[in-house]
Amino acid sequence: MSYETANFLVPTDDHTNVFIKKWEPAFPAKGVIQIAHGMMEHIERYHDFATYLTSQGFIVYGNDHRGHGKTGEKQGMLGYFAETDGFYKAVHDLRQVSELIQTAHPSLPLFLFGHSMGSFFVRSYIQSYSNSISGAILSGTGYYPTTQLIAGQRLASLLPPKEKAVWMNKLVFGSFNKKVGHAPTGFEWLTRSTEAIEEYIKDPYTGFIPTGQFFYDLFTGLRSIHNPNSYLQIRRDLPVLLISGDHDPVGNYAKGVWKTAEFYTNCGLTQIVTMLFANARHELIHEWNKQEVYEVIMQWTKKAIA
């Protein structure tokens, strides 16, 4: 094994204990990649991807977000960020992890990789901290009309904040398998890999139903990342890679990915690259062609460093 792992808990400003995992190659590193995982999952699902990155000379850090994985377990509830401002607190947690990374590795370039909900966190992060990183990779992201987000926010505000929002969960995800055809588990929209779906179903930290407050916080954060005025301070030459399967419902089957790229271009960003993978679904790093995805990410990252 040419890498080492370490797990640790870091208390945040509001005393939430955030679980962090690190993968480090057994030889001098050329950079650091910080992973922000998606909704209803956790950082351990990125182990294969992280070990690939270490083989290419990168140190990898990732945390379980509030309400997810071991962080959520410490909080006593999965699917619940915080009493207020949960989305922004999760983004601030990412920033605290970044500061920890940059203290430990001050001379190495830092890239953020965000998948799905994690991509939304990264999009919020770069509104304020783009000067502190060397690039951002957005996997499985999307673009949503403001009217839709306001409606979702209002509906979520009517729900009990700490109870599972079964109805809202169905409203958000219920149509995601409509283009899949045969979907016996309900999770087929995630990936074409039946093995990955089986592992997802068996995992106690995945596929849970979030709370009403979680959805309210999520819609609140989504509204902010779709506001062009929130990007006035972003550095225009920030390298951004958008990757998605063209069969991913979160990105509206590529339409939302292209809209996101156009949005950033209109905000003045000059280093936007978009890569779509034919027939792939939502979780690219758990897809049949995940090795191809890994290599695309690495080629782009090395070019961004050069």
Image: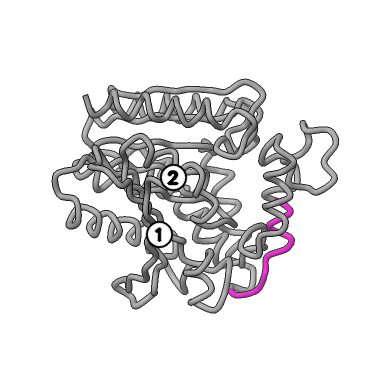
Residue 24 lies left or right of residue 187; in this view the side is left
C-alpha gap between disc 1 and disc 2? 10 Å
| Labelled pair 1, 2 in contact (Cβ < 8 Å) | yes
Within 10 Å of the Cα at label 1, are there few (<14), some (14-19), or many (20+) other Cα atoms?
Answer: some
Q: Residue at x 72, y 43 (%)?
A: 195
Please give left or right for residue 20 compared with residue 57 in the image.
Answer: right
For mark 1, give the secondary structure: strand
Q: Name the residue under label 1.
A: 21
With respect to residue 46, does 284 lie above or below? above
Q: What's under tag 2, amino acid-wise?
A: Ala
Quadrant in the picture for residue 57: top left
Please say if 34 is above or below 208. Answer: above
Q: Which residue is drawn at 58% across and 26% down?
A: 254
| Mark seen at residue 50 | 2
Quick one: 51 or 224, which is closer to the camera? Answer: 51
Residue 280 image offset from top left, x and y in percent: 64, 28
Helix, strand or loop: magenta stretch: helix
Disc tally is 2
> Does the magenta-highlighted stretch encompass residue 72?
no
**Residue 244: where, in percent of width, then height?**
54, 30
Colour convention of the picture = one colour
Instruction: Work out which residue is located at the far left of the displayed protein and give it.
Output: 107
**In the shown orientation, is residue 235 left or right of residue 167?**
left
Q: Classify mark 2: helix, strand or loop.
A: helix
Q: Which of 135 and 145 is in front in this view?
A: 135
Location of the C terminus (image quadrant): top left
Q: Which residue is drawn at 49% across and 29% down?
A: 243
User: Which span is picked out in magenta?
Assistant: 162-171
